[in-house]
Image (spheres, helix red, strand yellow):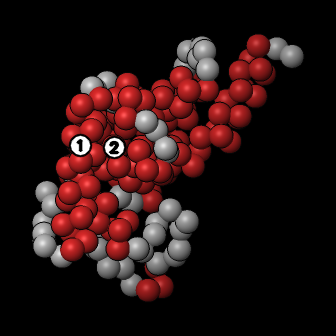
């Protein structure tokens, strides 16, 4: 087997293993399906173009999380994103379709309202089962910062669920 074929097979395995995670992170950050799909494609294209050799699956996972978050941030500040009009919040019924990541639950809606730094840590902690130390390393932060962000995010979520706060930003 050639080296390029081995690399291609490895990329296929990585996509199979981490596709859901990358898409969920992108969807959590971008808050819409089309942007999340664009981020998803860009992240795995970067992986294909990269010559980076990873020691373990944990390094691959951390790299994918970091690249996904950075790509989302870059998209938010791009001139295209800043100048385009957003779709209305309520679409006509015939345009709505169900997606396994787009939950209509109150909690998913409230998590989506959190500022980005809180959405990221909540997602990584609860949905990816990452430890505080792993999140800190992935986000180039400290464990105490991650703990503070988790605590603040939980407080905002608690208040919002109790109906005490109208705006969490």
Q: Position of residue 81 (x, y in %)?
A: 27, 49
Task: Tell me the number on the disc at residue 113.
Answer: none
Q: Is residue 80 visible?
A: no
Q: Is residue 5 above or below residue 92?
A: above
Q: Are marks 1 and 2 in contact (CB under 8 Å)?
A: yes
Q: Is residue 102 above or below residue 84?
A: below
Mark 1 residue element: helix
Q: Position of residue 1 (x, y in %)?
A: 86, 16
Q: Residue at x 48, y 27 (%)?
A: 63
Q: Nearer the viewer, residue 106 or 29?
A: 106
Badge 2 density bin: few <14, some 14–19, many ≥20, Cα 10 Å: many
Which residue has dot 1 on it? Answer: 149
Which residue has dot 2 on it? Answer: 121
Is residue 145 shown left or right of residue 124? left
Q: Residue at x 55, y 35 (%)?
A: 44
Badge 1 density bin: few <14, some 14–19, many ≥20, Cα 10 Å: some
Displayed quadrant of residue 65 = top left
Is residue 160 shown left or right of residue 28? left
Q: Is residue 138 above or below residue 19?
A: above
What's the CA distance linking mark 1 and mark 2? 7 Å
Q: Is residue 129 above or below residue 53?
A: below
Mark 2 residue element: helix
Q: Is residue 45 visible?
A: yes
Displayed quadrant of residue 149 = top left
């Amino acid at each position: 087997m050639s080296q390029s074929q081995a690399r291609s097979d490895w990329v296929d395995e990585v996509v199979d293993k981490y596709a859901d995670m990358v898409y969920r992170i992108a969807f959590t950050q971008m808050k819409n399906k089309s942007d999340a799909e664009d981020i998803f494609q860009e992240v795995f294209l970067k992986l294909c173009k990269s010559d980076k050799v990873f020691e373990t699956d944990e390094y691959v996972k951390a790299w994918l999380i970091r690249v996904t978050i950075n790509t989302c941030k870059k998209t938010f500040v791009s001139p295209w994103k800043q100048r385009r009009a957003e779709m209305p919040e309520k679409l006509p019924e015939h345009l709505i379709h169900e997606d396994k990541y787009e939950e209509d639950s109150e909690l998913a809606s409230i998590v989506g309202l959190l500022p980005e730094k809180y959405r990221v840590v909540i997602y990584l902690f609860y949905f990816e089962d990452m430890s505080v130390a792993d999140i800190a390393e992935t986000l180039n932060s400290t464990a105490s910062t991650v703990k503070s962000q988790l605590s603040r995010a939980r407080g905002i979520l608690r208040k919002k669920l109790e109906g005490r706060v109208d705006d969490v930003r």
